[in-house]
Image: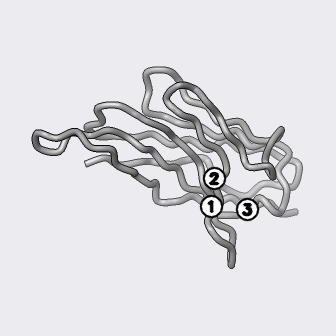
Amino acid sequence: QVQLMESGGGLVQPGGSLRLSCEAAGNIFSIIGLGWYRQAPGKQLEEVATISSSGSINYADSVKGRFTIGRAIGTKTVTLQMDSLKPDDTAVYSCNIRAVVKEGSQYRARDYWGQGIEVTVSS
């Protein structure tokens, strides 16, 4: 069983910074990709930033130049550095890991999600 543990959310003033971290625990054979998603009240889930196993990175247009996704090589941790935060960034942020796990004698790709962490940007 794979579990994701998120940390780092909270309340910050506009223009401030927060750093989210997500660590995976469990029997992972390999990681295919990692990402951060968010859902604001009354809105759909939005992809914020993703990083593939090869290091390819994508950002939502709304966060480009302000957010930075990171992963330390050889770890099961993904981070999201959020700078110049705006009230529109207020949401519940969740990390996602797509990983290959062994199930019985088979290796399968599975998606795992964190429990979600609140980020509130307000003065």
Marks 1 and 2, the one that precedes in the sequence:
2
User: 57 left or right of 25?
Assistant: right
Query: What's the amino acid at mark 2?
Result: Gly
Whether 21 is drawn above or below 94: the answer is above
Residue with the most extreme left position: 105
Mark number displayed over residue 3: none
Residue at 43% x, 36% y is 32
Q: Pointers 3 and 1 in contact (CB under 8 A)?
A: yes
Q: CA distance from mark 3 to mark 2?
A: 8 Å
Q: Nearer the viewer, residue 21 or 34?
A: 34
In the image, residue 2 lies at what x, y percent? 31, 46
Helix, strand or loop at mark 2: loop
Q: CA distance from mark 1 to mark 2?
A: 6 Å
Q: CA distance from mark 3 to mark 1?
A: 6 Å
Number of labels in the image equals: 3
Query: What's the amino acid at mark 1?
Result: Glu
Mark number displayed over residue 118: 1
User: 48 left or right of 110?
Assistant: right
Q: Pointers 1 and 2 in contact (CB under 8 A)?
A: yes
Query: What's the amino acid at mark 3?
Result: Thr
Q: Pointer 2: residues within 10 angstroms few (<14), some, or many (20+)? A: some
Mark number displayed over residue 120: 3
User: 88 left or right of 79?
Assistant: right
Marks 3 and 2, the one that precedes in the sequence:
2
Whether 80 is drawn above or below 119: the answer is above
Q: Pointers 3 and 2 in contact (CB under 8 A)?
A: no
* Quarter assignment of residue 99: top left
Q: Nearer the viewer, residue 61 or 89?
A: 61
Mark number displayed over residue 9: 2
Q: Pointer 1: residues within 10 angstroms few (<14), some, or many (20+)? A: some
* Quarter assignment of residue 101: top left
